[in-house]
Amino acid sequence: MDAFLAPFAEVRPTDVVDILLVTALVYAVVLWLRGSRASLVAFGVLLLALVFSAARALGLQLTTWLFQGFFAVFLIIVVVIFQEELRQVFERVALLGLRRSVRAEAPREVTDLLVECLGNLARQRVGAILVLPGEQPLSRHVRGGIELDAKVSIPLLESLTDPHSPGHDGAILLSGERVSRFGVHLPLSTNFARLSGFGTRHAAALGLAERTDAICFVVSEERGSISVASKGEIRRLRDASEVAHLLRELGELRAAATPSLWRRVRWLDLVGAFAAVLILWFVLVPGARPSILRVEAPVVVTNVPVGYELEKIDPPEVEIALSGPSRAFYLLDKDAIDVTVDATLANLGRRTFAITSEQVRKPAAMTVEDIAPAQVRISLASKQNRPGA
């Protein structure tokens, strides 16, 4: 137990900072996996890693060789499969450094205007998509459209969504109190389970909501209903009055982004991330530091010539200095270390044998640095001269 706790006695302030930073990173990755399609793949990779570890422990050479080839190209596979998710992660990291003051709730007059406009469009069964950007940039995800930069008004929005308007089939991008662009093409979602019962406009709105933190309002020209796509989800609203509630909620969340963070912490995931990082630190950091241990190893004589028996070993034990990573010594069984002397040549008169590192039985992670004494003398007695023989 003392050997197990020894590394923790060497913890330095830099180690504490190191552990906390990596814990935060691992926790962020866990949250990302929970919210993306990568979670199932990550679980599959974890199972493969466990099989690989078991194969190495059991000495399954062919299985180990195959898995080594797989993990050698694993990073390339991850980049190819999750290129969109990785782009989002890097964008969010960049936004942490570029983020301005958190945007507050939209002006009341704009909220009222959107509620009235969406209600009118729903009653008239005029299809439309209104996009309210969040903190993440949309330029990489949207195509086409016409720059406008005009103040939001009901007549303007109704004219842009008029079925005879050239931009009717595209989305309208809002920016605060202004319409920045209309007739914009959004990426289509392929999540057919969530899109059951929805049309192409809804697929476009969900596609953008899956890739960014934008909120998209959709009016269906077939049903005359209003739907909202946000955070990778889409749902129908009962009526236009829910739009005001959603916008108010959005403003409150943004205005109180920092305090609400701790209320939404997944403590089980955080504790799990901390435990995993602590184990990694235990194995990789203090466990990787070089260490030297001196042990008394017994001398074992083998291949005693026929007709002889071992009478004496001088000395019966030798001191061996072993070096290696500290983790190799944590649970070391000293009884598993010994020195083997081959007595095959003893019948030719040889009695003193030099000891080399090749004769020392030890864990593979350790290296023999010194042996003292470097030779042993063995005494053999003839069985024929033994009294009563």
Image (tube, helix red, strand yellow):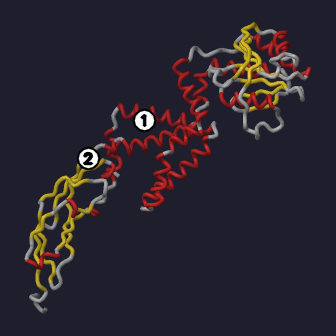
Mark 1 and mark 2 in contact? Answer it, CB < 8 Å: no
- Which residue shows up at 80% across the image and 9% down it? 153
The answer to whether 137 is drawn above or below residue 290 in the figure is above
Q: Tell me the CA gap for discs 1 and 2.
A: 23 Å
- Which residue shows up at 63% across the image and 37% down it? 36
Relative placement, left or right, of 278 versus 81 is left
- Which residue shows up at 75% across the image and 27% down it? 205
Q: Which image quadrant is residue 337 in?
A: bottom left
Secondary-structure class at tag 2: strand
Q: Nearer the viewer, residue 253 or 216?
A: 216
Amino acid at pointer 1: Ile
Relative placement, left or right, of 40 versus 127 is left
Question: Residue at the top extreme?
Answer: 151
Q: Which residue is mark 1?
A: 19
Question: Residue at the right extreme?
Answer: 124
Q: Earlier in the sequence, mark 1 or mark 2?
A: 1
Q: Nearer the viewer, residue 128 or 102?
A: 128
Q: Which residue is mark 2?
A: 291
Q: Which mark is residue 348?
A: none
Question: Residue at the bottom extreme?
Answer: 388
Total numbered circles: 2
Q: Nearer the viewer, residue 324 or 311?
A: 324
Q: Residue 13 appears at what percent x and percent y? A: 35, 31
Q: Which image quadrant is residue 357 in?
A: bottom left
Amino acid at pointer 2: Ser
Question: In the rendered view of the protein, which quadrant contains the C terminus?
Answer: bottom left
